[in-house]
Amino acid sequence: MSVCLVCAFSSCNKFLDRESQAIFTDDQIFSDQNMVKSVLANYYGRVSWGQQFGDNGSFAMLDEAGFSSGSPNNMQEFPNDFWRMYDYELVRNLNQFIVGVRQSTLDENNKKSIEGEARFIRAWTYFNMIKRLGGVPLVGDKVYDYTSGMDPAELQLSRATEAESYNYVISECTEAAKMLGSDKTVNSARANKWTALALKARASLYAASIAKYNYKTPDVKTAGNEVGIPALEATKYYQTAYETALDIINSSPYALYNANPDKGKNFYLAVTSKSSNEVIWAKDYAYPGETHSFTNNNIASSVRGDIDANFVTPVLNLVEAFEYTNDRKGDLKTKTATGDYIYYTNPEDLFANKDARLYGTVIYSGADFAGTKITYQAGVRYKENGAWKTVTGSPGASNDKFGGLITSEDGPTTSNDMYVNKTGFNIRKFIDENKDASTRGRGSDIWFVRFRYAEFLLIAAEAGLELGKPQAELTGYVNKIRERAGIQALTTISLNDIIQERRVEFAFEDHRYWDLKRLRIAHEIWNGSADNYNAVHYALFPYKIYAPGDPNDGKWVFEKQKSSHTLYPRNFKYQNYYNFIDQNWINNNPKLVRNPYQ
Amino acid sequence: MKTFFCKLIVSLCLLLGVFACGKDNYDAPQSTLSGHVTYNSKPLGLRGSNQSVYLQLWQDGYQFRSPINVYLTQDGSFSAKLFDGKYKLVTTSGNGPWLSSTDTLLVDVKGNTTVDYQVKPYYMMSNITYNVQGNTLKASFDIETIDASRTIDLVTLLVNDTKFVDLGQYTYKIEQTGINVGHVELELDIKDILTKSAAVYARVGLRVNGITEALYDSEPKKLK
């Protein structure tokens, strides 16, 4: 027996000692430029967090859109680990890579720009951790290794302060910008000088607004300033943000995309088309091989290529946030002052004179998508014995008694059916017009935009405002964006104007959550109150009138109502300003200080 | 010969399988730790829904530490099934509507154990009355300051059609801000809920600035 076991475990020792054919050595990697590039590509593929195509539900978490397909969503509060990330594995990999590149035999120029790219990705990774967790341990360029018998305390670093952490990101971006080239990259997929400066401007703005506004949440800080930045630092950060944003505005090869005379279409293309000259950095996708299912999941029913549709659909709140060309209040006019319906001949008439960006961001009733007109119809209002009544059906149902179609294939309904619209709108931004892209098998190769030119106009305006720059200069930046959107120019701007502008300009681009957080207004806007329009999701239900002989026959009325599929108002608590530090991380590294309210 | 060895190994494995493993599971914990969160030995009314307010139990002596969250119910009570042993009971700063303190309550759980956790709220509500006149619900109470380091954010009167009434679970509510210490009267039209619901419960609450969770009447009042 024992002989048998010994044989089994010791027989083929040569087999076990063979060199792997599948693992490259460092020498093999760092001597070949294409190998280096493919390692770098791996890192670029690992840096999507928060609102992103890999997590379709992330678009339904805020006040932009809600879940539509299937049964209602019953999220009551933002969890303590909401969108949390803590990726020191990636940081270590990048540090190994940086060491490898520095020691490699690649030519010096190439070496420099590759190191710059890696350092930019590392700064982006840190920035994403910092905006969730506050100050984090900064490991620098050192590659930490554990050898058995060593004291693990050497590997356990304590958290830097929030200010130090932002400073690190800012200085790394400054360094990376010096190493990187300034030419545009293919599909804006790789970092260049401007990408590094873009992150520098954004990180500075975040740090500045935290420093300025964290007085509003005096309990959201830690004794060692791991969370919380002293107010004195604000001006310095605003200055950096302002100067960096101006550098991008004035010297970069990017500009506001304005190639299409149709302003609505133009805005859609500015963000969604890869020919846009506005996008500084994006997560690029390519068919075949690297596609995503954002189009498949969220496309409108009547233009879908597969069974899936309407997973996440925009809420009325976002639609109303878009201004009218000559009216800053964007509320849709569905009823008269006396509470009667306003009758519209065509459904799209309700949206006439809205900000053109509404068309580019959201599909509303009567708008077209890829040449098909999309009409939402929740039901029919008809007259019976002189009284108005409403009938609704399942999507596509019709009955001659009510003049034909009752409920459109595109919804909306309040049922729990899968793939059926529940809010009366669909997302247009980032949705592929290529019908094949909405199939499960193919997927879409639309990019996800991370930085684009418009952001830096708004950063220059916001930082300039806080620094007391003249209004004429500030309105200049903002009005460029408003002019492209086809809405009235402003003569003065306030911080609230900028918050509003960012909300509509960058809907679905992973800005809203972080903007409300850094300005410390999230707990006021999403206060969990069922009476608060800002916290509750609303839907828009269009009804067609069927009343032969009545002057309003064939016209449309609209009903604003609470969304049936978002059960609870958004409730952002003080503790949501920073994610909790996971207990496992503390077990592994007792030097980590807990976050507030934890 | 080879088949013999094979059979031997297979049967040995089977024997191992049959005899080797006794059940090595622990028995489920048998002891209950229960009690109230109190101020001056009066239990506090809290939000009992959605695991909002909690205490934490920690136990020393193990390599990895993770807390056991003990969720509080609306009358301020808690209970947890535990193994016998020494635990530390703490509150998380900023979670409940009371002053944060780093005080740790050492609890020796042996069989069923009852322990009250003392806290110091910022304000207390007393002399709470509810009064239905027709379709109007009137509530009044006195606010007593215990620690003025935080100001009052709002006072509220809530009604719901279940026994669970708080700022996350309510049908109708009225809120008043800018309240100082003293006597407070709140009025709410409850015609709808009185006619539509089989049961109606009312409760008053008080929230301080900087803390998400409010302090409530310790017992919702049944109106219907």
Image: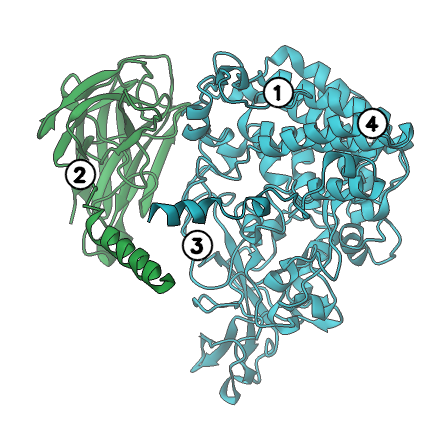
Q: In whole angstroms, how far apart are the C-alphas of marks 2 and 4?
A: 69 Å
Q: Is residue B219 above or below residue B61?
A: below
Among the chains, which one is cyan?
A
- Chain of the residue where label 3 is placed in the rendered structure: A
Q: Which mark is residue A73?
A: 3
Q: In whole angstroms, how far apart are the C-alphas of marks 3 and 1?
A: 38 Å
Among the chains, which one is green?
B
Q: Which residue is mark 1?
A: A138
Q: For the residues labelled 3 and 4, say whether their Cβ atoms are less than 8 Å apart.
A: no
Labels 4 and 1 within one chain = yes
How packed is label 1: few (under 14 Cα within 10 Å), some, or many (20 or more)? some
Q: In whole angstroms, how far apart are the C-alphas of marks 2 and 3?
A: 37 Å
- Chain of the residue where label 2 is placed in the rendered structure: B
Q: Residue furthest left?
A: B111
Q: In whole angstroms, how far apart are the C-alphas of marks 4 and 1?
A: 20 Å
Describe residue A420's horizontal placement relative to residue A349 as left or right. left
How packed is label 4: few (under 14 Cα within 10 Å), some, or many (20 or more)? many
Please tell me which residue lies in front, B58 or A507: B58
**What type is the residue that disc 2 sits on?**
Asn
Q: Is residue B134 above or below residue A416?
A: above
